[in-house]
Amino acid sequence: MAEESPRLPDPDRELIPAAAAQTAAPEGKPARSPRKERVWFAILVLTALMLGAALFFLAPQGFWSKLSAIGYSVCHQIPERSFFAHTHQFPLCARCTGMYLGALLSLLFHFFRGRQSEFPPPALLAVLALVFLAFAFDGLNSFAQAFIPLTAPYQTTNLIRLITGFGTGICIGAVLGPVFNQSVWSDAQPGAALDSFPRLLGLVGAAALLGWAVYAGPDWLKAPLAVLSALAVVFVLTLAYTVLAVMLLGRANQHKSWWELRVPLMLGLCTALAQILLLDVLRLLLTGTWAALNL
């Protein structure tokens, strides 16, 4: 009987443990090194802290003034078109307050529902499109009301601005939520999170409660909502820029957890803070004041 030749080690098998130590990547692309991930994450955390510190020291003194510096980058902040908690003006106008709080609410709804990657069905999209058109029409009417009053079809109010803002915020979440899930996760699920009119009505009901708290709630409830509206600006921008980051880095659909997403997510946060800081500086240079736009 012939003697069996000794079994040689399989190079491919020997490489498996080393490859397993690295973050998985699609076929044809190099795996990501955990060490490089840690280094980049540390660099981005430090960058975010530096940008946050720059914004903090650039803004006027006082907690509400520094909070207002976030809204200063995206909103006119006209007092007559804003809400107040005690004597402190919200960081955003009525319309922007509704829009960013509505977007925050809608995005959290999508994330708690899972990782569904599809947009709402056509009937719901049609309703959301009408809501956005109402937002745009009221915005144009408000603009006309400020500059050419005789052409304004009606006198808009902060309540109307708040309602249309919340509606548009829900629209933003209904689009950004699925886009985020289908771009980021490797295990994105089929189907839409906002898939029926009952769920839409539930979301609208939650938005109505938030809207009531902003419009007519006690000051002790308005104050945290004012803070939350400013943080919502950072949250929404961060998610949008995270989607862009995974595309530019070639890391779409490669993440199974938020921890695996930490580098693109921190890059999104850094970009959001950089945008806020840059727009603050530009507006300050153009107007010479931290006050609201004078329309």
Image (cartoon, rainbow, N blue to C red):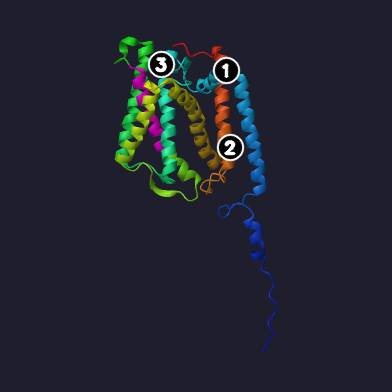
Prevailing SS of the magenta stretch: helix
Residue placed farthest to the bottom in the image?
1
Please state which amino acid type lies under the numbered disc 1.
Gly
Residue 81 numbered tag: 3
Identify the mark nearer the N-term, 1 or 3: 1
- Displayed quadrant of residue 28: bottom right
Distance CA(mark 1)–CA(mark 2): 27 Å
Task: Tell me the residue that label 2 is attached to.
Answer: 266
Vertical placement of 188 versus 236: above or below? below
State which mark lies toward you, 1 or 3: 1
| Viewport quadrant of the N terminus | bottom right
Identified at 68% across, 75% down, the residue is 7
Identified at 41% across, 16% down, the residue is 81
Please state which amino acid type lies under the numbered disc 2.
Met
276 and 27: which is toward the camera: 276
- Displayed quadrant of residue 279: top right
- Is the Cβ of the residue at disc 1 closer than 8 Å to that at disc 2? no
Q: Secondary structure at mark 3?
A: helix
From which residue to which does the magenta span run? 156-175
Identified at 47% across, 41% down, the residue is 180
Vertical placement of 158 versus 170: above or below? above
Q: Secondary structure at mark 2?
A: helix
